[in-house]
Image (tube, grey):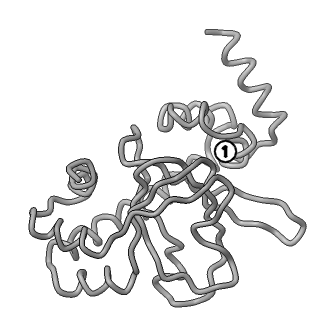
Amino acid sequence: MPEVKQYLNRVSLISNDTFDQINSILIEKKYSKGTFFAKTGRIENKFGIVLHGVLRAYISKDDGTQYTKTFFTPIFFKTPISFIGAFSSLVTCTVNRVFIEALTEVKILEGKYEDLLHLIKENREVAEWNRKLTEMFFIGKEQREFEYFTLQAEGRYKLFRERYPELETLINQYYIAQFIGVTPTQLSRIRKKMFATQ
């Protein structure tokens, strides 16, 4: 699939032979809206690349309050966050603490994390790709934290719209409000004010 190779090359260049090795450990799977790619309370063992649809990673508190921490989006989005997995559980082999839920119908190229680890060990290009992806995730996490604590809610919403212009028509505004750290009512007010001035 040339689109998948193009996505991988956005992180780090890989050869056709390496792409064939990566592709050999993946299988296409579909998830219905409302189903889970990962759940809390179990040790996860799979990763994937999102081809179509949107998922969210969220934390649920004991009182039922939820915090949406990440959206996983397809490889063709403006800002594709397409490499998916419950990474803390995968890396540490400990019980997962994050839900990953399909917000739409989803298609994923899915594989076993142990197979990816084998490729990382045996293939220098895959190892370099993994290193650069890890760096990108760390930088993205740090940037999101900085923006969360330094920007007002309206500024966070504007950044969300710039980075994920496709999402607003695909998912419930409730999840967007969770992601930028406001209530749905606050988000509604921000949207009314913003669109009134356009």
Closer to the camera in the image, 52 or 177:
52
Report the residue at 75% width, 33% height from top.
187
Position in image of residue 13 (x %, y %): 15, 59
Report the residue at 61% width, 33% height from top.
168
Name the image quarter holding the C terminus. Answer: top right
Residue 197 appears in view: yes
Report the residue at 17% width, 65% height from top.
19
Which residue sits furthest bottom? 93
Position in image of residue 126 (x %, y %): 21, 73
User: Can you tell which quarter of the image residue 96 is in?
Assistant: bottom right
> Does residue 140 appear to the left or right of 44 in the view shown?
left
> Does residue 176 appear to the left or right of 73 in the view shown?
right
Query: The disc labelled 1 sits on which kind of residue?
Result: Ile
User: Can you tell which quarter of the image residue 14 is in?
Assistant: bottom left
Which residue sits furthest right? 63
Tell me the SS state at disc 1: helix
> Does residue 184 appear to the left or right of 130 in the view shown?
right
Q: Is residue 86 above or below residue 138?
A: below
Position in image of residue 135 (x %, y %): 35, 65
Position in image of residue 105 (x %, y %): 57, 49
Q: Residues within 10 Å of mark 1 (few under 14, many from 20)?
A: many
Q: In this figure, what is the number of numbered marks?
A: 1
Q: Is residue 127 above or below residue 140?
A: below
Report the residue at 60% width, 47% height from top.
104
Q: Is residue 191 above or below residue 127?
A: above
Residue 146 appears in view: no
Q: Is residue 121 above or below residue 182?
A: below
> Does residue 33 appear to the left or right of 192 in the view shown?
left
Closer to the camera in the image, 149 or 107:
107
In this figure, which residue is indicated by the disc labeled 1? 180
